[in-house]
Image (cartoon, rainbow, N blue to C red):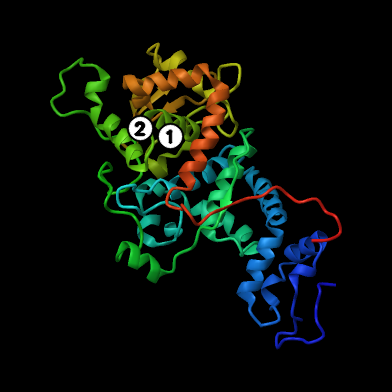
Amino acid sequence: MMGAGSSHQSNGMPPLDVKSLSVPQLESLLRSQQVSGFRDHNGDRVKLVEEVMKLSLPLSMLLIRSDLKDLMRAPHHDDGSYAPLFIRMAWHNSGTWDKNKGNGGSNGCTFRFPEEKGDPENAGLDLAAEVLAPVHEKYSFLSLADMFILAGCVAIESTGGPFVPFAYGRRDFTSEEAADKYGPSMCPFGDGLHNSHGSRLPEADRGTAEGAPQGCPMHVKEKATIDGVRSVFDRLGFTDREAVCLILLGHMFGRCHLDTSGYEFPWYSFGPTSWSAYEHGLGYLSVYRMAVARGQSKMRVTGKGKRQWEVAFGGGIEPFMMLPSDMALWWDEKFREWVEYYDDNRKQFRLDAVRNFKRLVELGCEGILTEERPFPPSNGGR
């Protein structure tokens, strides 16, 4: 049935000519997970797997996307979805890129190594890796680096957001390869200039300016956090507009956990697992004008000593929470311009969100990625 020859291998599997398979046969092969047991006529499993990917990738991507979408539903996790967690995973695996050093980013999957996994900014992401492990085991021809990014793309779509095109080809570095690139840490952690932990990822709060006069404007008092946000995105190669878009995209979803980050509550309590940049207004993008601009967002120190800003509604609804780095988008005049722009231009935000997220997750992957193709029609042949 699978184009087998008459001879058999020592493992009992016949040699396989994947080019003779129809789309339904490729689907059967992929679903059965038998690809690793077959060899080509030269006994080479690696080349066979690559050939199967080449011929059936549109099909396999549909299957993986479908399984990932099913995985999003998580009644016992937070607000019933893993989508915010997977979006954060993809963001954090990519946000280590340094345009000046030419390293970091999602290629290599260095999150697997202890120092990057131990980055305080990555607290809680072990769960994402754990939940994704069975899907990666099922589709092991895709690298874990690719799986982490694809999960983030599917997560955005699963919330009611736009389809995010995916490109594959990232590698999972061996420990030797990672050490050659980054030294003993095997990852891009420890040299972050704008995070007190040494992380390359943005820090939520850089503290108030030393000696700032009482009653001074917030862009003066909170200059360190504003500068930290801008500097991290500049290192990634993003403009103020792109930085605002990516922060609004990421913080539209999910919640903070007191025991993980020291912060608590959702960013958007009315729908923390849904795309809330509604085309005709309201939703998460309106919080800045409707609450922050009107002085309704009040600073509170959490039980872990962290400053956060909250808009309280009462009636059993959790407060809307904002980190100092979220507030920085309003305190800084140049950032604020783009917050207001996207509040007024929701369709453009949706378009920019796709473009900027795709660009983010491909930083450091130039020249190694292949775009996902549309699914080919089944015509009885390959």
Q: Residue at x 30, y 52 (%)?
A: 101
The residue lying toward the viewer, choosing from 243 and 194, is 243
The answer to whether marks 1 and 2 mark residues whose Cβ atoms lie closer than 8 Å is: yes
Residue 194 in picture, x, y percent from top left: 27, 41
Q: Which mark is residue 167?
A: none
Residue 57: x, y in percent? Answer: 68, 57
Q: Is residue 311 something one can see in this rendering?
A: no
- Identify which residue is drawn at 43% across, 27% down: 321
Look at the image and tell me in which quarter the N terminus lies.
bottom right
Spatial separation of the CA atoms under disc 1 and disc 2: 8 Å
| In the image: residue 30, left or right of residue 142 | right
Residue type at the position of mark 1: Glu
Residue behind mark 2: 302
290 in relation to 380, above or below: above
What residue sits right under mark 1 in the picture? 264
Question: Which of these two is toward me, 373 or 234?
Answer: 373
